Amino acid sequence: MSRLDTAVTTVDHRGPARATAGSPATGSAIRLQGVVKQYGTGTSAVMALRGIDLSLARGSFTAIMGPSGSGKSTFLHTAAGLDTPTSGSVWIGDTEISHLRATRLAKFRREHVGFVFQAYNLLPALSVEENVTLPLRLAGRGVDKPWRDRMIHSVGLDDLRGRRPAELSGGQQQRVAIARALITRPDAVFADEPTGALDSRAGKQVLDLLVQMTHELNQTVVMVTHDPMVAARAERVIFLADGALVGALEGATTQQIVDRMTGLGTW
């Protein structure tokens, strides 16, 4: 069962899921209120998100799925502060990020948001340890060595901390990226197809780590994926279609997710 906050979400395959809740300080890690994202104007305008209302609790693991072009990437980028909504508001923790100036938003993301991408995005000239602590160095912050050591240990890379990315397997590189995402103790971690470039064994290890993060560190994880088997590891799966929330499943099996996706049309 997903550990949601006091928000009450109505799920119906016939229409959008809506969430209502109190003030942003109720314990939610991420909150989107009436979020619209439009690209372009006039007849050429594309509505990527259509009034998204959603609240995700601290310590929850949520997968985002939908057909191609449904708005998954736009949702992730907007929720993480990589893009700004055309209208509506986005909260991470107790901070509304949707109207922050660019420099302040970049600083906030660096300190409060973690990212895990399919391409790893490690710096090839840096060691495992240096890549993990890079966000702290960029922020001009000192390194909490016990926390650094715990993060490297938690992803199983104690013996590889001096190696460069080129000396690591894909699964090991992704584990470095996960430790790097956690080093600042962020309010939320956003993962974009984190197992997409991995074989099944390495992918399982990465998913095990994401689950571990929510249980042991009370970390909030939001993951975009196209793979029902990957999504089934999350506590809750939220479905998008044509830029709108169209339903959710909690504790779903792979087959239940496949059935719901089939009902949404072309993957």
Image (cartoon, rainbow, N blue to C red):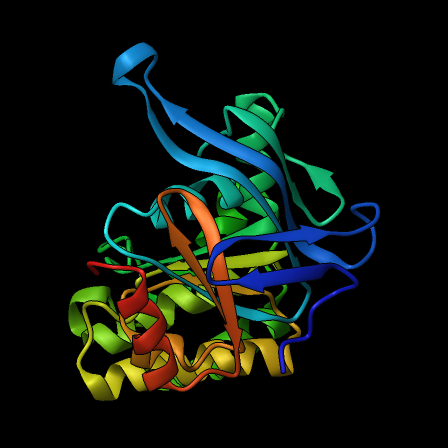
Can you give x and y, in whole percent of width and height, for residue 26 in the image?
Answer: 83, 55
- In this rendering, the count of numbered labels is 0
The relative height of residue 84 versus residue 119 in the rendered view (above or below) is above
Q: x, y percentage for residue 60?
A: 61, 70
Compared to residue 182, the image places residue 94 above or below, namely above
Dividing the image into 4 quarters, which one contains the C terminus? bottom left
Judge whether residue 31 can be spotted in this image: yes
* Residue occupying image coordinates x 74% and y 59%: 7
Among the 4 quarters of the image, the one containing residue 1: bottom right
Left or right: 122, with 251 as reference point: left
Relative to 127, 8 lies left or right: right
Residue 131 vertical placement versus 51 (above, below) = below
Image-quadrant location for residue 178: bottom left
- Left or right placement of residue 228 versus residue 53 in this view: left
* Residue found farthest to the front: 14
Left or right: 256 in relation to 96: left
Residue most extreme to the top: 42
Q: Residue 115 occupies which quadrant of the picture? A: bottom left
Q: Position of residue 210 (x, y in %)?
A: 47, 76
Visible in this render: residue 157? no
Front residue (pair 225, 105): 225
* Residue at 28%, 80% in the rendered image: 203
Q: Which residue is painted at 55% across and 50% down in the image?
A: 113
The spot of residue 245 in percent (x, y) is 48, 52
Q: Residue at x 38, y 74 (%)?
A: 231
